Image (cartoon, rainbow, N blue to C red):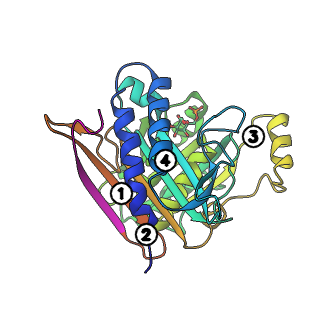
Amino acid sequence: MDRNLALEFVRVTEAAAIAAAKWMGRGDKKAADQAAVDAMRERFKSVDFCGEIIIGEGEKDEAPELYIGEKLGRADCSELDIAVDPLECTDSVANGVPNAMSVIATGSRGSLFHAPDMYMNKIACGPAAVGQIDLDAPADENLKKVAVALKKDVSELMVVMLDRPRHEELKNQIRKTGARVRLISDGDVAGAIAPSLPGSGIDLLMGIGASAEAVLAAVAVKALGGELQCRLAPKDGAQKERLRKMGIKDIDKKLLLEDLAKGSDLAFTATGVIDGPLLKGVRYTADYAITHSVVMRVRSGTIRFIETHHKLPAYQ
Ligand code: VTB
């Protein structure tokens, strides 16, 4: 029987999301992250699988749990590349603002790009605009082409980007075309996926974000039929040297979906912590914690949205 492990991983992201949600708006991002990491690590034990973390909480010496290179599951095999972000948007949870979620992406061994801890320049669009974006083209050219593909006026386009001083110039270039910009405080995993979601109100993601987030988003964008292009953006010589040591020869390569997440044996599981374009956050009733999750599988193209009512006080 063909097994959809990503469906089993929902219980893992659900547990992490619920654990993190307890810290929502309490101003403590470290505690929120730790709660998500602990819950994810613990819940992984209940799933029968084997794999190795290639994107996680950091290098072994700085992250005791879910570190890069950590083997998860059965010890006798290693079938999966695992990319995790137990809590994408720790700051958002601390401040109670949108976009936080718990994410797991998997692929067969060797399929996921070993993303170093540094920035990438990114552009993403949804299925209707595939083939129309180019990371190397000026913003106005990308916007004109996407507008034609989406049968919209440029002024109707909405571009999402992280609200960072480094985006000042790009933001102005976009505004000059008449297109609109939605600034987000964090969460460019959800931001990169949003253009591929009908009804998100977002047509493009542009700008610089973290490279681990690019790999996580790539799996979902692939499942949804959109496009994501990235390029590593090392900030100094030391980061370039690190890339060389990692065996990345062509630092300037434009990374396409196939470079970030190879093949079709890929899956994406996420549970919302705070509302975002992809998922609603955790809600509480007197008796239940309610979670919203998504499971996407590239091979079949199946997208499942799962609402789960967790009887309390099971998670308290
Ligand atoms: C983004 C965002 C993340 O890191 O990738 C960002 O999606 C990039 O780093 O939620 P800066 O904060 O330095 O801009 C996060 O904000 C945190 O991982």
Indicate which label's residue lies in the foreground, 2 or 3.
2
Q: CA distance from mark 3 to mark 4?
A: 20 Å
Residue picked out by circle 2: 4
Indicate which label's residue lies in the foreground, 2 or 4.
2
Sequence-first tag of 2 and 4: 2
* In the foreground, 248 or 73: 73
Indicate which label's residue lies in the foreground, 2 or 1.
2
Task: Specify the label residue 189 is tagged with.
Answer: 4
Against 61, residue 232 (above or below) is below
> Residue placed at 41% from the left, 48% from the top?
13
* Residue farthest left in this picture: 286
Q: Which residues are magenta?
A: 303-316
Q: Is residue 266 left or right of residue 224?
A: right
Indicate which label's residue lies in the foreground, 1 or 3.
1
* In the foreground, 255 or 1: 1
Q: Is residue 96 magenta?
A: no
* In the foreground, 262 or 208: 262
- Image coordinates of residue 185 in percent, x first then y, are 45, 31
Amino acid marked by disc 3: Pro
Residue picked out by circle 1: 294
Residue picked out by circle 3: 234
> Residue placed at 34% from the left, 48% from the top?
277
Amino acid marked by disc 2: Asn
Q: CA distance from mark 2 to mark 3?
A: 36 Å
Sequence-first tag of 3 and 4: 4
* Residue farthest bottom in this picture: 1
